[in-house]
Each structure stands twice: as C-alpha cells, then as structure tokens.
Image (tube, coloured by chain):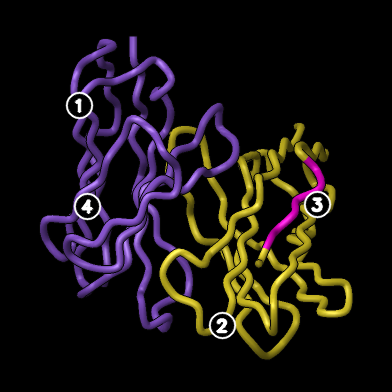
Amino acid sequence: AQSVAQPEDQVNVAEGNPLTVKCTYSVSGNPYLFWYVQYPNRGLQFLLKYITGDNLVKGSYGFEAEFNKSQTSFHLKKPSALVSDSALYFCAVREPGSYGQNFVFGPGTRLSVLP
Amino acid sequence: SQTIHQWPATLVQPVGSPLSLECTVEGTSNPNLYWYRQAAGRGLQLLFYSVGIGQISSEVPQNLSASRPQDRQFILSSKKLLLSDSGFYLCAWSDPGGTTNYGYTFGSGTRLTVV
C-alpha cells in the first residue's frame, strides 16, 4: 500500500531565507507525486506535480520540488521565502494506473515565515 | 475548463439537526468525487468517494452519509448532527482516466460548527 510521510509538523523560516518542506513516500513502481497548499479556511490548491521526466519540477508561486527515486523523497523548496507563503502544505502520492481513491495525502506541514 | 463548487461556505447547526452539503463539478463528465473532513486545520480524512451515479464507498463508519444523484453532483448528509461532526469539509474531484492534471481538484470547503 502506498503511503506518504511529512516528518515535520511545523517549519519556521525567516523571510528571504530558503525553505524546504520534506516529503517521503512509499509506493509500488514509479509514483505520481504532488504538492498542495492550503490557506486558512480554504480548499487545497495544486502547487506542482511530478509525473515523469526531469526530476526537478517547478510550480506555482516560485516553488519547486525534486524527485529523488533512491531516497524516495519529493521535498518542496523555494529559494526565498515570503510571509505570504505561510500556510499548510500537503504532499500526496498516486500509483500510476490507479484510479478512484488511490491517492494518499501526507499529514501536512505548517510553514510559518517570520518577517 | 473544469470548476468545482461547494456550498455553503460556513454553517452553524444545533446538535440533532440534519445536514446537507452540496458539491457540483462543471466541465467534465463522469468524475470521481470525494468528501474529506479536516479537523483542527491538519490532516485530511477521506469520508466517501464515488466513481459513478449511485455508487458510494464509505471509508469511515460514522454519522454521515453521501449520495450522488447526478453525474456531477455529490451530497454529504446527516440525519442528526453530533458535536463531533464539527470540522472543515472538502469536496474534490479527479479524472478517472487520470489524464487531467493526474491529481485532485478541491472545492473551497465548508466550515461546519455544531453547537
């Protein structure tokens, strides 16, 4: 069964500093990987995805993530954090060829960017 | 383009009262539909999913039920609300063929407070 771990409940970073939100996964075969962001009292918004190809994927709002197959990781990064990046971030995995409910979310990491 | 609508945005209901939350999707056919609950601004709990009209799968036994009377309509209901039903409810859809974004698209959520 596929699973996703986000080892940090909370990440604090100063504005202007680089940020990393960690995600590791377990899945059979090559995974589809996603990052979503959630602002207070809002639905989840899609940030970026890895399906195939280049291991470094770029997404919305200057975020990027690197797929590392050997470490089974898909960490979210941004070179320079903004206060407005403060939100709840979810990593998710889907097995290729799986449909329906086979989409697993991590527990979420709360990012706080301090001014 | 595809859009998802979820309403109401907020709801305050007394214990023992009924509940009906509605979600509709536009711009796609035969979507997979999902209801999630999020407690205390953290992890997502999958409540129900549906792969077609009248087809509902329940992930967690509880005081809630779901129905899909039309292809792009998904309803979350309860006959008698409990205090523990309070939370943030999210509807989502995905393309069963796995070719539209490959991931989930979420509605804006409903904040339910049972008093």
User: Relative to residue B62, is residue B27 drawn left or right?
Assistant: left
Q: Dot 2 surroundings within 10 Å: few (below 14), some, or many (20 or more)? A: some
Reading the image, the residue beneath label 2 is: A96
- Which chain does the residue under circle 4 lie in? B
Circles 4 and 1 in contact, beta carbons < 8 Å: no
Which residue is at 70% across, 43% downward? A109
Q: Dot 3 surroundings within 10 Å: few (below 14), some, or many (20 or more)? A: many
In this structure image, what is the colour of chain B? purple
Reading the image, the residue beneath label 3 is: A19
For label 2, the SS is loop
For label 3, the SS is strand
Measured as percent of width and height from the top left, residue A104 is found at 58, 60
Q: Dot 1 surroundings within 10 Å: few (below 14), some, or many (20 or more)? A: few
Which residue is at 53% across, 44% downward? B44
Mark toward the viewer: 3 or 2: 2
Reading the image, the residue beneath label 4 is: B74
Measured as percent of width and height from the top left, residue B21 is found at 23, 37
Query: Which residue type carries mark 2?
Result: Pro
Work out which residue is located at the far front of the displayed protein and give it.
B61
- Which chain does the residue under circle 1 lie in? B
Reading the image, the residue beneath label 1 is: B79
Magenta highlight range: A3-8
Could you tell me how far apart the alpha carbons at marks 3 and 4 are, in whole angstroms? Answer: 38 Å
